[in-house]
């Protein structure tokens, strides 16, 4: 007996197969060139086609339909797991598959942000797609989407990590804790760290810790103001 088809898969969604047909040559080209801009535009259309349980566009592509559609796309362009192949070959295909998937995600990120932002100039279209939302800011907040490209986010995280490592190395030596030659780099590191801090990082922090952090921030602000005055 043939296996039963799920009650709903992406093939059952009107327009999904047409997008797959459109995506296949673009994904195949991206596989060779790593130019994922064109395929990202089609993937964006799938985020509007597939919906969340609440009936809203699946902008984050977290639903089963969106994941299955992308998996089938990658399979179709030669990234199907070769089950009978040696382990090394299977691992190689898996790495290449994930590499392209990541490249598509990075290309999709700014395309998605630009699309949502342009809806601010088309309120009727925004209301049709995202009923009840009055701005792109509300949409980003609802979906927990940072309106930056994924590459920008990864670079920011990298700079944050490097800043922590740099400050740690600067403060690990003997007195004076920071040598004059390292002053400029220390300021850059502090700036990168400070701009990476956001209020949500402290959600759930107890009252005593909050009080201590406020005191440390106050002392830090005073020290930075003194440095700013010294550079005037």
Image (cartoon, grey):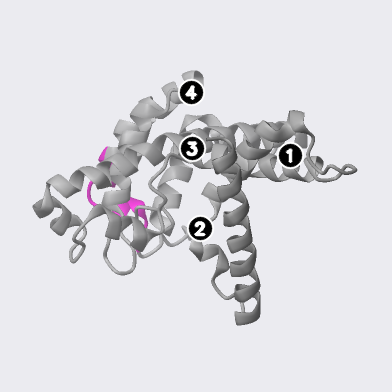
What is the spatial separation of the Cα atoms under label 3 and label 2, in whole angstroms?
A: 17 Å
Left of 146 or right of it: where is 167? Answer: right
- The residue that label 1 is drawn on is 166
- State how far apart marks 1 and 4 are (Cα): 33 Å
Which residue is denoted by mark 2 in the rendering? 198
Circle 4 residue: 34
Contact between marks 3 and 1 (CB within 8 A): the answer is no
Vertical arrangement, residue 164 with respect to residue 36, above or below: below
Badge 1 element: helix
**Circle nearer the N terminus (2, 4):** 4
Q: Which mark is residue 152?
A: 3
Q: Is residue 182 visible?
A: yes
Query: What residue is shown at x 18% (from left), y 49% (from top)?
Result: 120
- Pick the residue in front: 136 or 81: 136
Q: Residue at x 37, y 28 (%)?
A: 37
Determine crowd level at label 3: few under 14, some 14-19, many 20+ residues with C-alpha closer than 10 A.
Answer: some
């Amino acid at each position: 007996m043939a296996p039963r088809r799920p009650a709903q898969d992406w093939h059952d969604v009107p327009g999904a197969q047409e997008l797959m047909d459109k995506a296949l040559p673009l994904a195949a080209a991206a596989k060779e060139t790593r130019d994922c801009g064109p395929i990202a535009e089609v993937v964006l259309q799938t985020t509007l086609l597939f919906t969340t349980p609440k009936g809203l566009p699946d902008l984050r592509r977290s639903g089963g339909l969106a994941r299955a559609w992308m998996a089938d796309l990658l399979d179709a362009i030669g990234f199907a797991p070769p089950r009978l192949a040696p382990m090394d070959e299977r691992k190689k295909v898996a790495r290449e598959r994930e590499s392209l998937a990541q490249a598509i995600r990075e290309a999709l990120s700014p395309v998605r942000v630009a699309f949502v932002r342009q809806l601010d100039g088309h309120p009727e279209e925004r209301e049709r797609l995202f009923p009840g939302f009055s701005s792109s800011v509300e949409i980003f907040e609802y979906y927990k989407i940072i309106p930056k490209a994924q590459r920008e986010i990864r670079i920011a995280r990298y700079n944050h990590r490097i800043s922590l490592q740099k400050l740690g190395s600067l403060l690990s030596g003997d007195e004076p804790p920071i040598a004059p030659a390292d002053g400029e780099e220390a300021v850059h590191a502090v700036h990168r760290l400070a701009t990476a801090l956001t209020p949500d990082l402290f959600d759930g922090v107890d009252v005593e810790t909050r009080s201590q952090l406020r005191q440390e921030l106050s002392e830090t602000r005073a020290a930075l103001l003194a440095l700013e005055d010294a550079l005037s």
